[in-house]
Amino acid sequence: MKNPLYYILFLVWIALFCCFFTPIGLLAQETQPAGTPHASIQLLTTSPQASAPGARPTSIRGLSAVSDKIVWVSGSNGTVGRSVDGGATWTWTTVPGFEKRDFRDVEAFDQKTAIIMAIAEPADILKTTDGGKTWKLVYENKTVGMFMDAMEFWNHDSGIIVGDPINGRFFVTRTFDGGDSWHDIPYAELPKADSTEGCFATSGTNIRALSPASACFVSGGPQRSRLFIRDKAIDLPLLNGATSTGANSIAVKNPHTFIVTGGDFAKDTVQDKNCFLTLDGGATWIRPTTPPHGYRGCVEYINDSTVLCCGTSGVDISTDNGMNWNLISSAGFHVCHRAKKGKTVFLAGSNGRIAKLIF
């Protein structure tokens, strides 16, 4: 048997060790952000680059997830992509005659039917009913200065597109037959814009359905950002001062609860005034306690309390209705979208990157 003195000294050493290191361990646990979600971004694919000499990689800003399996994307270089297996494999199309056009938004209804929007001069809308094999031009507007920003559908039949101001009023066109035909809202009924005000065709999410019978959209610019609801124009407290500042995206939880994101896409790491939320339909606005970590061009509700936003400097997630945001990826994405009939959240961005959110 060993000397009892050694045994006593050993016990004393163990006690000192525990007293010294246990508080350090507890401190390390306490300094972890409370409620930090276990979420990450998984890259699925990158789209093919255009083969023409000097062509730039495809930038994807249009994204529409019909279900956990069916997802469509659209972007520059006349590019449209479709997956019917949750993003495992993709079919890519360069729309003939539109090789140099930028499809900033897409609305898909199933694996065969989708609508794409080419933004500017002329502003064109195309529709496919055979999975992207062929496309029909269903609308064209050659007005000087035309620039369509985003598209939203309430259901399979009713949709709306908002565009930058023409002669001092925002452009709006509607469809009531699933995009087969479009009808411009009369000029006198269009929302008035300030001289420097416009919309950002960042992610197709600056216009959203507010109720079964109405929509809302947000604007930006060097002087002001606003939220337009029916005949009301509500000033937003987002960052301004440059043509690259203002609101880029809005997510609607219910007719009273919205989150608006934006900032300055030319200085995309600036966190100042890049996100605000309202609980009373825009009467008052709340700045998050912990804002997103930079400019964010898209925001999307994932469930009742979880919200995702993305921009060129990263992706943030909030599990408390947008009051506190945690950076989960420094990789930039233009758009994020939860499946209409499912739970999968997809993202897309520059260089043709497509990803999904992993919990």
Image: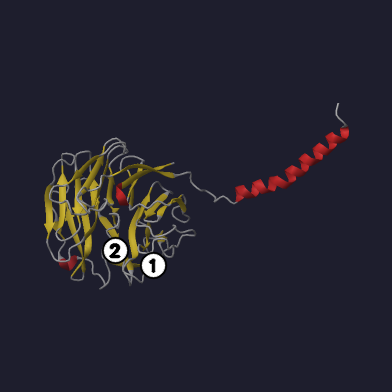
The C terminus appears in which quarter of the rendering? top left
Q: Nearer the viewer, residue 225 or 292?
A: 292
In three-dimensional space, the C-alpha distance between marks 2 and 1, rounded to whole angstroms, equals 17 Å
Amino acid type shown at disc 2: Phe
In terms of depth relative to the viewer, which is nearer, 240 or 278? 240
Element class at badge 2 = strand
Q: Position of residue 249 (x, y in %)?
A: 33, 58
Percent of width and height locating residue 296: 38, 57
Q: Quadrant of residue 196?
A: bottom left
| Amino acid on which disc 1 is placed | Leu
The tally of labels here is 2
Question: Can you give x and y, in whole percent of width and height, for residue 10 in the image?
Answer: 80, 37
Using the image, tell me which numbered label, if any, was put on residue 239. Answer: 1
Q: Which residue is mark 2?
A: 228
Q: Camera-side residue: 241 or 260?
A: 241
Pointer 2 local density, CA inside 10 Å: few below 14, some 14–19, many at least 20: some
Q: Colour scheme of this structure image?
A: secondary structure
- Numbered disc 1: secondary structure: loop
Q: Is residue 324 left or right of residue 266?
A: right
Can you see residue 159?
A: yes
Residue 155 visible in the snapshot: no
Seen in the picture, residue 285 relative to 174 is either above or below; the reply is below
Q: Going from the N terminus, do you reach mark 2 or mark 1 first?
A: 2
| Quarter the N terminus occupies | top right
